[in-house]
Image (cartoon, rainbow, N blue to C red):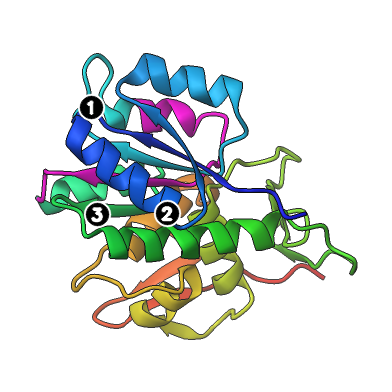
């Protein structure tokens, strides 16, 4: 029997909490509820959660702080929802590792579709692989798509979020090709992206911080102004 997926909704407004939770429950998900950081941490310790829907404005620790703390040790999918609609809030949430961001008032149907897409991708990545892992080496780095891991030239395993890994894998598999932002967005998710979405730029910045000797003068992921990016890492022989 297929396991019922669990979604944790963290929201301090009772009306919004029940609206989102109830919508997911009607669709067959098991929903856990929390109204603050204490409740969120309690549910994460008590249950195997598949997805978190996280409000930014919470009593005590805010949602961004919770997201940043979660990303230290977990790739658990997170959709951030917030009444803050400024671009900087979207960017900060993505930089902290959010998988998606929705403005309030939340369109529940859109939230459901985005949640399903994220859960589907997460399930594919967690499924056991029957085939041999696909390993690619470049400039001393080792990217293992099967194990979903990245090892530095010094032999250290580098933590990548889901989005970072998907993007690096897509780029590294197409060295020397100029890839437009729309192409890179398509590799990240099966959803309709908001106009002027800066997800790719945020993820590129984070990847450069992890694989470039000098992120301000990158030599592996190069910007092609007005077009997109090109992966310039050399395959090891």
Q: Which residue is mark 3?
A: 102
Is residue 216 visible in the rendered structure shown here?
Answer: no
Q: Which residue is mark 2?
A: 26
Range of residues picked out in magenta: 66-85
**Which element carries disc 2, helix, strand or loop?**
helix
Which residue shows up at 65% across the image and 58% down it?
A: 123
Asked whether 195 or 224 is in front, the reply is: 195
Alpha carbon of mark 2 to alpha carbon of mark 3: how far?
A: 21 Å
Residue 213 position, x and y percent, is 51, 47
Residue 18 position, x and y percent, is 28, 38
For marks 2 and 3, give the one nearer the viewer. 2
Say left or right for 101 vs 115: left
Say left or right for 103 vs 116: left
Say left or right for 225 vs 161: left
Lower sequence index among marks 1 and 2: 1
Q: Where, by quadrant of the figure, is residue 12 drawn?
A: top left
Which residue shows up at 38% across the image and 60% down it?
A: 112
Residue 173 position, x and y percent, is 64, 76
Asked whether 46 or 125 is in front, the reply is: 46
């Amino acid at each position: 029997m297929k396991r019922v997926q669990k979604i944790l909704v963290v929201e301090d407004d009772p009306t919004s909490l029940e609206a989102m939770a109830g919508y997911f429950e009607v669709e067959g998900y098991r929903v856990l509820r929390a109204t603050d950081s204490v409740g969120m941490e309690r549910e994460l310790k008590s249950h195997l959660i598949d997805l978190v829907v996280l409000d930014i404005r919470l009593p005590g620790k805010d949602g961004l702080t919770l997201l940043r703390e979660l990303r230290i040790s977990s790739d658990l999918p997170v959709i951030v929802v917030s009444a803050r609609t400024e671009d900087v809030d979207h960017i900060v949430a993505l930089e902290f590792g959010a998988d998606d961001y929705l403005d309030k008032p939340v369109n529940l149907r859109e939230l459901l579709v985005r949640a399903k897409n994220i859960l589907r991708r997460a399930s594919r990545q967690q499924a056991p692989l029957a085939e041999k892992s696909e390993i690619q080496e470049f400039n001393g780095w080792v990217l293992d798509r099967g194990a979903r891991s990245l090892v530095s030239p010094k032999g250290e395993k580098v933590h990548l979020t889901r989005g970072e890994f998907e993007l690096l894998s897509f780029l590294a598999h197409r060295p020397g090709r100029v890839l437009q932002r729309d192409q890179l967005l398509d590799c990240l998710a099966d959803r309709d992206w908001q106009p002027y979405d800066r997800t790719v730029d945020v993820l590129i910045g984070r990847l450069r911080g992890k694989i470039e000797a000098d992120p301000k003068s990158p030599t592996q992921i190069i910007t092609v102004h007005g077009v997109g990016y090109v992966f310039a890492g050399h395959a090891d022989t």
